Each structure stands twice: as C-alpha cells, then as structure tokens.
Image (cartoon, rainbow, N blue to C red):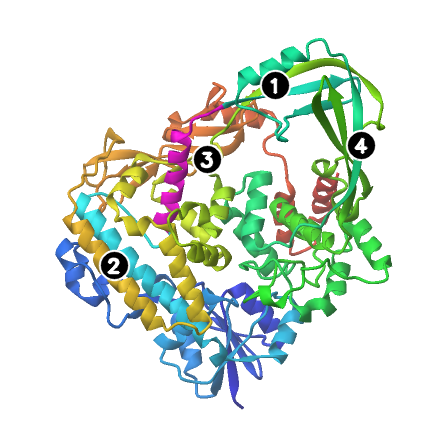
Amino acid sequence: MSKSVVLAEKPSVARDIARVLGCHKKGNGFLEGNQYIVTWALGHLVTHADPEGYGNEYKEWKLEHLPIIPEPFKLVPIRQTSKQYNAVKALLRRNDVKEVIIATDAGREGELVARWILEMAKIRKPIKRLWISSVTDKAIKDGFNQLKDGRQYDNLYEAAVARAEADWVVGINATRALTVKYNAQLSTGRVQTPTLAMIAEREKQIREFQPKSYYGLQALTETARFTWHTKAGQTQSFDKEAVEEVLQKLDGVHSGKVLEVKSTPKSQPAPSLFDLTELQKEAHRRWSWSAKETLSTLQNLYERHKAVTYPRTDSKHLTSDMEGTLKERIKAVDIGPYRKSVNALLRSNAIKPQKGVIDDKRVSDHHAIIPTEETPILQDLSDKEQRLYDLIVKRFLAVFFGAFRYDQVTAELEAGEELFKAKGRTITDEGWKKVYSTEEEEADSDALPPFRKGDEVKIRAIVMTDGQTKPPARFNEGTLLAAMENPVQFMAGESKDLIKTIGETGGLGTVATRADVIERLFSTFVIEKKGNDIYTTSKGRQLLELVPEDLKSPALTAEWEQGLTKIAKGQMKKETFMKDMIDFSKKTVSEIKTDDKKFRHDNVTGKTCPDCGKLLLEVNGKRGKMLVCQDRECGHRRNVSTLTNARCPICKKKLELRGEGDGRIFVCKCGHREKLSAFEKRRANSGGKKADKRDVQKYMKKQEEPVNTAMADALKKLFDK
C-alpha cells in the first residue's frame, strides 16, 4: 500500500498531525500509520553553503576575492540537525512513498523549509500542500480534506529563494568587505542597515530640533476650564507679547456669557483585529516586551495550546469563508473574564462583525490573529501567555459589538470680546468598550456641566499657559516596528508613486523577520537600550559612515521587498530581481574597496583576551555589559554585568549583577549595592523564592504516580488563593 510523507516544520506540530491522522508507530524521527508517515524539520534542516563551500580560497577573508557570486547557489544540510535531515531523506526515498504533503508553516519561509529539503534530497515525487491557519484538530482534519496542489505555491517558493539569495549576496559580500577593510566586526545587510539608518536619522532629528515656546489662555470657572481661541481658530500662539496683551485686556473681566452650546453625535468603531506587528507594538506599549518576546509567546499559544491562529500574519482582516466559524470561536472563549461579553453576544439575534473586518481583498496568505475554536485551560497558560491571549480575545470580541457612541458637547464663552471654548463628551452607548469595562484605561467620562445659551458664568481667573514644542520621540521596539512596517517618513526625495506603493505593500523586512532584525542589531552592538529607548552606539554610527549610501536607503530596501511580493504573485521573474541584487552587490563592494575612511574602536579596555591576548572591547548588550575581543577571528566574549529579575529592596526596580565569581555584586540605579552572597542570605531568610504558577505546573507534571497528590493539591490550592 502506497503512503504519503507529511513534512511538518516542528516536532510539536508533527505530533498533533500524527495524532489526528492515526499515526502512532514511532520511528527514527517520524510517526507512521497505515496511510501517512509524519516527520518534521527542526526549523531549517538545509541552508545555503558558506563562501568556503564554493572554494577553499574563500576560507580566508580577502578583499581581492570579493564579490563572491555563487552560480548556482549550493545547498548543504545544517550540521547540528543533519541526523534529522538524513532521517527525513530516507523516508522521502522509500519505495512505498508515492507523494509528499508539505505541512510546514503556511507562508514564504515555511515553503522554503520544505522545498529546500526536497531539493537537497533530489525528490521529484508529487507534492500536495496543507495550508491551515491553526493547528486544532478540526483545522487539521479540514485541511487534509482540502489539500492543495503543491504547484500552486511555486511562485511563493521562488520568492523565498530570491529573499535568501539576495540576503546572501548582499550580506556576505558587504560584511566581508567592511570587516576586512577596517579590521573590525562590521555586519551589514539588506534590511538591518536601513533599519539602523532610520534610528540614526531619528537621533539626528532630535539633535537638530530647535524648541519653540508657545502660549495660550484659559478661563477658569467654578465648574469648567475654557480654552482661548484666536480669531483664526488657534488655541496657541508663538507671539508671547500678543498673548500678554490679550491677558492684560481681560484683567478686569470676571464673568462671561455662553454664546452657544453644541452637541454633536460621534461614534468610534472597535479597533482592527491584530496582525503580528500591531500585537508586538501593543505588547511593548503595555509591558515593554521585545518584539521577539511577543512572537515567542504567541508561537506557544499557537503551537502548544492551539488557542490562537497563525502568528506570522500581516493582515488585520478575515475572509468571507470564515463567517460560519465565528460563532464557534466566540463560544470557545466563554470562559473566565470573557463570559459576560460572550453571553451578551450569544443573546443577540445576529453575530456579525463590524464593517470592514471581513475583506477578502486585504488577506493574502493569512487572516488576522484570532482565537481558535478550541477552549484553552487558562490555568495551563503562563502569565505571559495569559496576558497575550487576553489582548487577542478582547480585540476579537470587540468587533462584534456596536460602535462606541457619545455626544461631543462644546460650550462657547465670550469674555471681554474674546472667545473661549470648553469641550466634553457624554457617553450614549458603550458599544465595544463594554469588553474592556474592567480596565481603568478604558474608563472615560468627561461630561461638561449643563451650560445653556445665554447663561452668565462667573470667571474665577484668566491665566496664561505656556509650553514648548517637542522633538520626535526616540525609537523603542514598538515604534521601530511601526517605522519598519511603513518607513514613508524616511523617504524624502522619493517619487510620490513609490512612497504610496511602499506605504501600502512594502516596508523593511516582513512581519516574520522584523523581530530577528532588531535582535541582530542588538547582538552586533550597533544599537543599545537605555530604559526602553533605543540608541545607536559609536560602532553603529561609524558603520553608517562606512557603508555605501544606497545600502542605507529605506526606500530602496522597501522597493526590494515589494519585488519579492511581485515574485510571489507571479508578476516578476526571480532572475530579474536577482540580477539587480547582484549588480547592487558588485557596486557596493567596489565602493567599500576604494573608500579611504577609517574605523576607530573607542571602547577598548585595558583587559586582554584570554584566548588571543588582544585588548578587549566593552559593549552594551541587550541585557547588560559584555567584554568582546576586537579580533573578529577570535570571537571571545563574556558577560561582565547582567540585568536580572531580582528586585531592589528599596525601590523595587530590577537589579544589575556585576563582576565575576564570588565577588559579584548587585547594583541598582537608586544607589543600592549588595553582594551576591548577602542577597542570597536575605532571600533565604525571607523564605526563599515563593512558588509561582510555573513552579506549580512543573511540579504537577512530575507527578506520574499519585504518591504525593496531597502535596500537589496543597500547592495548587496555595496558588489558587
């Protein structure tokens, strides 16, 4: 009997698929049943060969060898996962295997994971594609009942290959050229360097910003605060003398007359559903999570708990064929804090999302991130997973409630021939905000007192207000993600058509890669964090001076991303795209070779590297300071301070652990200092670390036999309290 090999991306997903398909026989890297053999990659099993794979002469980094343009590109198994690659290859080559079902992540990179394995193993058997947006049992069953012809995704694969080859050609050549030319570890790339350039440009805007003072007036009554409006309708003026003149004119005015009271009905629809970038921005705004942190937590909710749909999506909309599943998804979240909202929806006659949520034209590979039809056990979720799930569920439920409605009330007051206005609003229908009614940030009622036209109002005082214009804020991880998604503000001088197109479909990187790009900028020490704000380092600023201008252009890089999208849609040939990338790489290497700029390490310490004897550099890593060898070939690095989760006993902020060995010491920004030994003694005296939910979960999982169930129950009760 012939069989089909099902190739998943991760073991956890493979196990779920195998269970649904009835594949219970365990083998070396696979699970087998009567009809299917389910196996898995471990992320990528195959990758592009390093430069030395194209000739031994490339083992040594030399300028004269550049640029290196593989023709064709070679694929090699990744050494760390070669055992699983060989297991997958053996399965694919079995005589009883007649077809392959690709079940890797349904997206560009997932397609690359599977196709590279097939290409490396020289498999030419028919291909089918499992394309699902969640890994619940129902989604898997439905997906296998509607398997796609693998050829439908050939263009997607071409786009994935183009992305990988472009990154290799630009990144490898430019990085080698810069590193050898300036004898420093200088990494650059097609997406990371323009992202760094945007951060530097924002810093320049802040540096060059000239604040201007502005002034206004307010009339204070017993019940309200009225703001002065000029005859042109402005509430502020940069002309201090003119404002002071008006204030002086009003010196003897102690009452005003209400000229008019306007009430205008307003409505506000629920916010859009989440795509990955929007969710990462929101998690950073609320809890200062990194983009990587959010994606990792979201991946757990998707793969492990089956609670949400596919994470790496760039759409905030749903497709029309999902309408029939919405009621089931609402019922699935009829738990805990969402029960009241769910019951209200289920009691209504029709469950229909607000206008614009369902839009087939605005969904490409995957729809917005929403709950699945499976009800999770909230107690099984970690604290982070619960928080993120809460964001997704509330945003999902909100779109089924009506608009938030209120009356915008404006009272106009005339005092000494000058016009003052006060605004307020009266809520008439909470609408979608009912879903958030327990959150303080959503509580808002700022109604005006009941003024009437013709009322005389006593004025307690008329005061002058002032302020200063502010520069743009520094980037944090949330706002940097937004800029990468839509870098239009950094495209001065580009054509309006290009800016419009890129604003709609381009950006730097993709939703799936932006978090990794930011992490790489941190790990190569070209940016650093101070609080939540991101700063360029001296190394980063010098790197931008050394790289050719075109490699820093957000417009050019966003245009390349647009090219990859065209390849995926069959609107551009991969060869056309790659010709441009190869030409660009040759030009970049040539410019670096002929440049006469210098690079200077300004963070050299007096400490020597224990491996090669050269002086070490002190750099700020994402979670503390590190010592790094300046010799790129040595690669030695070690932590000298780490930001920990331990809290200061005085101000409760996170403590930094400095030093090495027994001499390590905790240091806080408030000035508190404490030896590690003293800290551990203090913690021991206070009863040590209290059991949190994760401790309870780990303990419960270890109870394979009911020997200590009483203790497990006691721990669980303690946690529940």
**Element under label 1?**
strand
Q: Where, by quadrant of the figure, is residue 157 drawn? A: bottom left
Q: Report the front residue among 149 and 701.
A: 149
Specify whether residue 22 is in view: no
Amino acid bearing label 3: Arg
C-alpha span from label 4 to label 2: 65 Å
Residue 652 x/y as whole percent: 57, 25
Assess whether mark 3 and mark 1 are in contact (beta carbons under 8 angstroms): no
In this view, which residue lies farthest toward the left? 64
First in sequence: mark 4 or mark 1? 4
Q: Position of residue 212 (x, y in %)?
A: 48, 24
The residue located at (65%, 53%) in the rendering is 272
The span picked out in magenta is 192-212
Binning the other alpha carbons within 10 Å of mark 2 as few (below 14), some (14 to 19) or many (20 upward) gives many
The residue where tag 3 is placed is: 474
Dot placed on the residue nearer the N-terminal end, 2 or 1: 1
What secondary structure is marked by label 2? helix
- Marks 2 and 1, how far apart in space? 56 Å
Q: Is residue 428 magenta?
A: no
Point out the frontmost of discs 1 and 3: 1
State the mark number for residue 465. Answer: 1
Left or right of 557, for residue 634: left
**Left or right: 430, with 640 as reference point:** right
Instruction: Specify which label sits upstream in the sequence, 4 or 3.
Output: 4
